[in-house]
Image (cartoon, coloured by chain):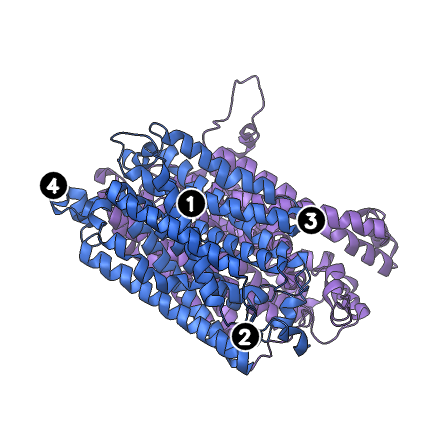
Chain colours: A blue, B purple
Amino acid sequence: MANRVLEYQKKDLPQNMSKLGWALFAIGALAGVAAFYVDNTRAAYNYLIAYMFIMSVGVGSLFLIALEYVAGADWSVPFRRLMEFFAALVPLMFILIIPLLFNLNELFPWMNKKLVEGDAILTGKAPYLNSTFFIIRVFGILLLWTLFFYLFTRNSMNQDSTKDQKFTKRNIIISAIFIPVFAITLTMSSVDWMMSLEPHWFSTIFGVYYFSGTMLAALATLTLAVIFLNEKGYFGKLLIPDHLYSLGALQFVFINFWGYIAFSQYLLIWYADLPEETVWFLHRWSGSWAFVSIFLIIVHFVVPYSILLSQPAKMDAKRLKIASIWILFAHILDLYWLIMPNMNEGKSGGAVFGWIEIAFPVALVGLILVVFNIRARNKNIIPVGDPKIERGLNFRL
Amino acid sequence: MNIDYTIEAPVVEGRLTLGDIERLVAAPMESKPDKKFYIALSISGTFLLIGAVLLAMSFYKGVGLWGNNQPVGWGFPIVNFVFWVGIGHAGTLISAILFLLRQKWRTGIARFAEAMTIFAVMCAGVFPIIHTGRPWLAGYLMPYPNQHGLWVNFTSPLVWDVFAVSTYFTVSLVFWYIGLIPDFAVMRDRTTAKIRKTIYSIFSLGWRNSHRNWQHYEKAYMLLAGFATPLVLSVHTIVSFDFAVSIVPGWHTTIFPPYFVAGAIFSGFAMVVTVLIFVRKIFDLEKIITLNHLEKMTKVILATGLMVGYAYGMEFFIAWYSGVQVEQFVFINRAFGPYAWAYWIMVSCNVIIPQLFWIKKIRRSIPAMLVIVILVNVGMWFERFVITVTSLHRDFLPSSWGYYTPTIYDIGILLGSFGLFFTLVILFTKALPVVSISEIKAVAEGAQPNHGGAH
């Protein structure tokens, strides 16, 4: 039994993957830098979209790891290492945040002291929405996430060589602590980075809404990595459609969850029709934004729902790959829809789309590939020392 | 205790043979009811009668006997309705959603939980109908063209409730019955008494355990699980809409739908655990409904309890963050106003006490578990009370503020609903297999094909 697992030890990923990653990242980053010179505000908003996407994948992967431990899942054990690679985006966010720090005034109206003083509502929110507390929160949260990332991966890596079950037990405890921390910090991040872009507006479900997108982004990147590595033979021949089914089913669950949350938020605000709440949707309905809003429903719910509904679709690597790429695109679109309409705040309504909107996602994809490659270097691609690895590989529905 | 993570804990303990499983589950139906059964039945029957009598008086004299009045027009009836619908949700979660997610441990508890769903929805259904004051007119809730020119208001979530709950009840009943068919066949084959054999034969629909039978069964079961899943979510979502679509501060908040669903699962699991603790003991099912099952359920209770706590916190935070004064007032009034006692019962029972389930010893101790789950039930009833009453009793006009007190009739009818629920549960344990015999056989050790090793 042990020999079978040994086949997976330390294989290098294909060279061209790393090259492609660097190329995409270089092109995107160059274009991004140019974008900051051409139109600083617009570039800052786009950068925020990319930053939130990285957050989705990074901390979302961390949450999936914790979920696996807490739920005692075995099917996902062979993929857990891949999630750990993606979670490495979390510490990187300390660097990625820098361009945002220089543009906070561009992004957040409540950073403008004069505006706040003349506005009773914003003055009321000032104890929470002020730049000092904002910075404390943002860095505090990044520190916490990085700490959990470090603990999870250290225990998991140590287990590779020692095969000691105590690391599993430790990680279960860490996961149980992480999940409530995650709920609070992710909500705070969504309020801070996205809801407060429109500082008058509020919605209690907003944190849950962002969470649903986070899960989809993390699951879709994981699925793509699993399918790609499996095609190249990195999992031997042991991954079967049952494993893919589980990934597909989870994607399907969260597609529905996103639809449910988005619908709940919209219906309740539309039905009550209170001006302080409807304003946010009205901004997303002015001019060409109306098309983006309709498009979002189709892209983020109707299409992936139709792709993933049937059982064979969840077991078929090809269709699952299409669904995953589609979902990643949908998540970018979702973030675009959440963030960009605040750039003009209804002044000159209408969605903007051009090379700047393409540059950042390109850099983003490149960056994820690069980080994945660097993390995977000289490491086992599956957690060979995990006590549940055999159960995971032998998983049958 | 050290766990070996390399092996999966068996779902059924004690290496029962398939015959043992049949005998264990069929035993309550094949023995004469004993004294304990009659005592339990008479207690729950008494409560049911109390409720029936008080309800009859309410009809005779009018619903003015209840505490409902301005400004709190929605008192106990709505609170009880939401409470019972919520209890029902755990059943569908276990029988349908956990089935779709291929959780094998659900087999031991699914039948019982599903039965509780049906009984709880029955209890729930009573309340909105009696709350109308003239229950004999309830038929008009169905939109059909009639000579009175009456037509329902489709923009009201109360009407959506009628459709959602009745559809949910129907699908749950069919789903439950489909699952029972193979077990009816088992009972038919076991029994020798003539009348019972005839009854079981009719309900087993000519089941012969053939491959064709099973194939159709599996397909139908899967499809119904697929139907039941969105239904169960829609029901409590719509129940939350009853409150949230209005512009009453404290009711209108966007997190209500997922928060209500999480709360429903929370309270439903607490009720399932409460009842199962007794059932597994009385009917000797401890090897089928194991301590591991109960522990898993306490984990679900802990998780959903945290979600509910998250929603409480988020509501408070956004009430402050929104800068809307009435919103802020309602929440401060909730926590420190005249109903603060109810609010703090809710918070301590739903958020603080379930935190004890972080400790493994408590998760595996039956007495501790029983106390906590009963408190969760209390807390979840109070949650609905807090939402309904505190938001209404001080509305926009201070001149019309008031304090709602339930009357003896309100309390009696609530007790009556518990009587109805437990009477049905007790009768169920004697009339039908409380655990799915065929599903348990499929997860018993040695029943699975062996995939490991040789290929």
| Disc ID at residue A332 | 1
Decide if residue A189 is in sight here: yes
- Residue at (45% x, 65% y) in the render: A374
The residue nearer to you, when weighing B176 against B6, is B6
Q: CA distance from mark 3 to mark 1?
A: 34 Å
- Mark 2 against mark 3, which lies toward the viewer? 3
- Amino acid type of the residue tagged 3 in the rendering: Met
- Mark 4 against mark 3, which lies toward the viewer? 4
In this rendering, position of residue A367 left or right of residue B431: left
User: Dot 3 corresponds to which residue?
Assistant: B222
Quadrant housing residue A182: bottom left
Q: Report the chain holding disc 4.
A: A
- Residue at (72% x, 65% y) in the render: B443
- Mark 2 against mark 4, which lies toward the viewer? 4
User: Dot 2 corresponds to which residue?
Assistant: B364
Q: Report the chain holding disc 2.
A: B
The residue nearer to you, when weighing A175 against B357, is A175
Residue B353 x %, y %: 41, 67
Mark 2 neighbour class, 10 Å CA radius: few under 14, some 14 to 19, many 20 or more = some
Q: CA distance from mark 4 to mark 1?
A: 35 Å
Residue B207 x %, y %: 84, 50
Q: Are marks 2 and 4 on the same chain?
A: no
- Residue at (28% x, 55% y) in the render: B335
- Amino acid type of the residue tagged 2 in the rendering: Arg
User: Dot 4 corresponds to which residue?
Assistant: A118
Q: CA distance from mark 2 to mark 4?
A: 58 Å
Q: CA distance from mark 2 to mark 1?
A: 45 Å
